[in-house]
Image (spheres, helix red, strand yellow):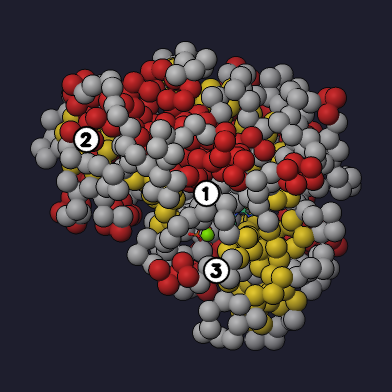
Amino acid sequence: MDRPSIIHKDLAKQRQTPNWTAFEDERRRFSWQFAHLATQRLPGGGINMGIEAVDRHAAGVLRYHVALRFLSRTLPAIEISFAELARLTNRFANVLQGLGVGKGDHLFLLAGRIPELYVALLGALKNGTVVTPLFSAFGPEPIATRIQLGAGQVLLTTDHLYQRKVCQIRAQMPTLRHVLLVAEDGGVTHETDTLDLATLMRDASDCFEVSETSEDDPALLFFTSGTTGTPKGALHVHGAAVAHEATGRYALDLHAQDRYWCTADPGWVTGATYGIIAPLLHGVTTLVDREEFDAERWYTLLEQEQITVWYTAPTAIRMLMKAGPELARSHCYPALRFIASVGEPLNPEAVWWGQEVLGLPIHDNWWQTETGGIMIANTPAFDIKPGSMGRPLPGIDAFIVKHMEAEGEPPRVRIIEAPNVEGELALKSGWPSMFRGYLNNEARYAKCFAGDLYLTGDLARVDADGYFWFIGRADDVIKSAGHLIGPFEVESVLMEHPAVAEAGVIGKPDPMVGEVVKAFVSLKAGYEAGEALRLEISAHARKRLGAAVAPKEIAFLAVLPRTRSGKIMRRLLKARELGLPEGDTSTLESGA
Ligand code: ATP
Ligand code: MG
């Protein structure tokens, strides 16, 4: 279907006056120094993410406002107010202190989306303890590797996960001094060499003297998704809260009265940063659904929980699209006013699906584990060009650069001023949530910088209006007969075909042209894989992209391999196609 290339914002039709409406003015006015004023600060001038997110509101008008609301199929809803969260997190901080775990020590969290995980993360921050949430679906090896890398002293998990995954690898983690267990049946645990969290929490005091943390003190260690290789541990500091607050305001348009749902698991940087910290900083009620993806359930939650702001990922949107528009239309969403997405490029098809089926366009935004917060976004303050990841937020300067260094030299780049030239996306260093290092990998960290520019490893272009367009990861770009082909462009066109639910595109080595484009597609319900359909999709791609860029080969897969954070793993499609070793698959979603 031919659609306009722009979705205009009509302020009069917005359900809530946005936090900002004038893009240029706000960017001009903004400074990080000024943004710091939105945070409370500790008496000595320091900043603590836990205090900012919880105690600030617990001491103010939002004291009895619901901070977190947990839902599951089988248990009654659990609601925790800011006052209660302050009390519980104090208790957990006291538990850590009682165990001799202090500032700079390292806590790992391995659990589903249970209240204890949220309390522990925030309580540890108050104690100055560095926190890493892990995906609860990780197997023993990825758990051990990450705890070894982070030299974790404490692990919080559940009795079931401990028995299934941790018990047998305990000896591989000599730094681990304490394992705290949550009894899944709500009782008390008696595993040897572990401590029962409920008992410790019951005996701990409600009062806690917060640890003096400065803006440069480490707070969180997140592992990257492992889309392009072995996941890297990126270290973040307490001062990042300033960026979480600002980006929550500009990119997610959070207001204290919102009912907000971030569908990402806290095991991924998005789930911890925008599923816990940023909404709490804004005093927002955050929904936590403990269940896995289910289209019918998600629509019901959006409707019945009266979600106002929804932050999700392209993979989830594609799964909802796959379930068909009728299901979406059997519910209504009068409260919903803003939808955002992150993690992968959002195909224009998906932006329009939001507009047509849910009544709201989806706002794509871009960031990385390393940037610690949203950098480039579609926001309420300007029109959307579907397919573009938006414009840099206030306080963020983004550029397209070309590399100048010779092989083996440290990076040296030139900024490309002209619009629509493809190159690497780079950001001017200095925003507060920028990572401060890769764990045990100084050399890799150093390679990310050219002077004061942080090099993202993603290729993009910027148009004359300052909108950024994602081309692909530097590793994924296909070189065919002198053309540089971004997989995203090809995948987006494939997704326009009514039968295609998802597409992943790779370059397959070819003696004549270097690489040929090969596409893997999964189909929507009601479509049968077969030669006729293959030819039809191929013809559509050729018509839209031309013969040089359209896939030469198309294969059907029931599901594409993706990371637990929902990203298509093109490197795995390629390794499987070429019969090469699959490399690190610790983050691969099971069943793919
Ligand atoms: P690894 O670094 O281990 O290979 P990863 O890069 O996927 O994994 P994350 O930090 O979770 O780990 O993801 C950041 C990357 O995701 C970005 O560098 C970019 O490639 C991609 N990404 C995120 N948001 C978007 C977006 N809106 N559009 C396009 N790509 C995006
Ligand atoms: Mg990365």
Q: Nearer the viewer, residue 325 or 308?
A: 308
What type is the residue that disc 3 sits on? Phe
Residue 482: x %, y % from top left: 75, 81
| Residue 97 tag number | 2
Left or right: 412, with 270 as reference point: right
Q: Nearer the viewer, residue 575 or 483?
A: 483
- Check disc 3 and report its element: helix, strand or loop: strand
Q: Nearer the viewer, residue 209 or 232?
A: 209
Q: Quadrant of residue 493?
A: bottom right
Left or right: 347, with 184 as reference point: right
What type is the residue that disc 1 sits on? Ser
| Residue 433 tag number | 1
Instruction: Please rate how many residues cluster around mark 1, counting C-alpha atoms within 10 Å: few if below 14, some from 14 to 19, many from 20.
Output: many
Residue 422: x %, y % from top left: 74, 68
- Check disc 1 and report its element: helix, strand or loop: loop
Q: Residue at x 37, y 42 (%)?
A: 213
What type is the residue that disc 2 sits on? Gln
In the image, is residue 144 above or below residue 282? below
Mark 3 and mark 1: Cα distance apart in space: 16 Å
Mark 1 and mark 2: Cα distance apart in space: 27 Å
In the image, is residue 236 above or below residue 295? below
Q: Residue at x 40, y 68 (%)?
A: 442
Furthest-left residue in this view? 192
Camera sees residue 38: yes
Sequence-wise first label, 1 or 2: 2
In the image, is residue 363 above or below residue 449? above
